[in-house]
Image: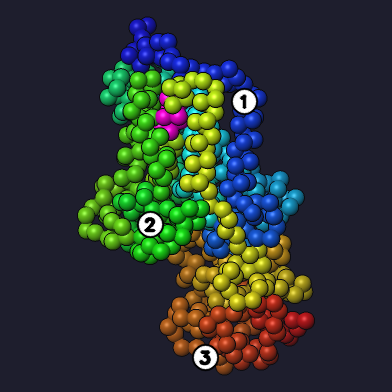
Amino acid sequence: MPATSETAEHNLPRPRECRAEAGLHSSTGHFLGFGMCVFLAIVFTLPWSLGTKSGLLGYSGDNFQHAWFLWHFAHAVVKLGNPFYTDLIYYPNTVNLAWSTTDPLAGVLALPVSLALGPVVAYNFSIVLQLALAAFFARLLCLRICGNEMAAMIGGVCFGFSPFLLAHALGHLSLVTAFPIPLYFIALDRVLKKGEPDWKDGGLLGVALLLTALAHYNYTVICMLATVVLIAVDLVLTGSPLLRNIWKPLLWASATFVAAFSPLLMMLLGNSSDMPKPRPFDHLKQYSADVFGFLIPSWNHILFGHFARGLDLSLFVAGYEGTVYVGPLILLLAIVGFSKGRTVQRRWAVQAGVLVLVFYFLSLGPTLRFFGHASPIPGPAALLYHIPLATFVSAPARFHVITALSLAILTSLGVAFLLNRWPKKRARYSIVAVITVALLLDLLTIPFPVSSAADPAWSPDSVGRPVACALPARLQRGTVLTFPLINWPYSMKSMWMQVTEGGRYKLVDGYLSYSSDRIWSDYYRNPIVRSLLSIQGEFHTPVNAETDRQRAPAAFRELDASAIVIFDSPQRDAAVRYLETVLKRQGQRFGSCTIFAAPVADGVADAK
């Protein structure tokens, strides 16, 4: 069979900088590489990565939700239940968790730690492990492309500890679980580069795509879009014969993914009442990257963090979701990699360059924002977001993950060029040392933030020390109603209270990134819940405590309630007075909350 232009290129003698070095594919080299990635992941999350029981890595917020998901996954496995359904929150509903970021892949990898050491250690372990895995698999991809161990390691660091992933490590475990993306690129490269890829190559590609779905659905959509871009670039470079070579393995990949993903797909689409609404358009605009975001470091940057805190707050309307900072060194090395890499790896240099531009433009969202100021100018993603399902990629800035990986590829090509330009051992080590130090200074976020494991609402600026809400053991049964409901940070306080007390009771409250509207209609039916929601301002109906007192026994029986927990909040006193009238008793203070025992059939239980 005649060789195509692409296969002929691969049969040519390789230039020195891309020739495989000794031990390139040795298990020892990979083991040492992974060990270095783990070491760096610990360094990047210091000092709390060394003291894993005192708090959760990151800012107080979504990190507690992801810790709850890890705990629930282990809880469901122990009880031989389905981890994608639960009645532990939003009781009496059975909630479909499949639409939310339930971290099944991270849950599987952390399962032994979850069972042995608990949710706090499991979450912190997961953040460190996922950063290390992202760097390691990016290293494998870069090694496949440039063939240089040291250059590949630097490329892996550029992706695994990129500002994008480190920003999401502040609270989004599912988005830090990014290692399936370089793994998918490796599998896709096998299909595109082989002269005659077979069903095995397609099957591996389908499995890699499945792993992206078990990390985060957004990553699956993003990888599929990246595949279209890569094939389009390859068609330009190699011509139409490419399609004749790859259509069968791509079909096998699709079949493998659909077959393996079908159980989750049935959970997602099987019951229309479980389907949530997509994010509104204003949400998409807010969580887009700024046009000049690649110049804007995070507040935690080791050198420029203080400067970033002094910038206009409008630059940070997306929070850490909008972090797409690149850094001058990575940008410079990537430019060198694109310029010089085209002579030795023309295909990947061009592909990575196109991916950088396409996905950075997509990260800007449906309308452009310049240095924090919104504009009416439509962004390149405007066309994409006219597709209804595209709105489930709820934060366009997440497209930057492909930009970060592509920059890492180009950086590895740039470093490989420099190492070949100065081949003497001393010069090579000096180059690597200078680049490593400069990268650490540009990427490190020490000290990495931590949230108190005692109280999700506590911050270093809070008065006093964090105090947990402690529910008496005799009330840890049935269901617990908490106040305020469906309101951050109180919903997270209730879920975390449930976790720390071993999941012995269910909650009327809860928080999910995606949930069905039917949950909120169910809340309105229960008179006690409806009145409490009115007190906190969610509903605008009159509250009559005397009338509710007559309905209270039946209302609490409907919930199978054992206790009502009132957290400190602006409406705390009003809620306490309401319950004192309804229950004809005073609540008791336990830690940072006030607790009322729910009435039972034979009277009122005593919270002592």
Q: Earlier in the sequence, mark 3 or mark 2?
A: 2
Question: Can residue 163 be spotted in the picture?
Answer: yes
Q: Give the number of the disc on residue 287.
A: 2
Residues packed near mark 1 inside 10 Å, few (<14), some (14 to 19) or many (20 plus): some
Residues packed near mark 3 inside 10 Å, few (<14), some (14 to 19) or many (20 plus): few
* x and y, in percent, of residue 129 in the image: 61, 43
Q: Main secondary structure of the magenta part?
A: helix
Q: Which residues are magenta?
A: 410-417
* C-alpha distance separating marks 1 and 3: 71 Å
- In this view, the residue farthest toward the left is 377
Q: Nearer the viewer, mark 1 or mark 2?
A: 1
Q: Is residue 481 above or below residue 588?
A: above
Residue labelled with disc 3: 544
Horizontal side, residue 113 vs residue 155: left or right: right
* x and y, in percent, of residue 306 in the image: 46, 60
Q: Give the number of the disc on residue 29.
A: 1
Q: Quadrant location of the N terminus?
A: top left
Residue type, label 3: Asn
Element type where label 2 sits in the image: loop
Element type where label 3 sits in the image: loop
Q: Nearer the viewer, mark 3 or mark 2?
A: 2
* C-alpha distance separating marks 1 and 2: 40 Å
Q: Residue at x 41, y 45 (%)?
A: 327
Residue type, label 1: Gly
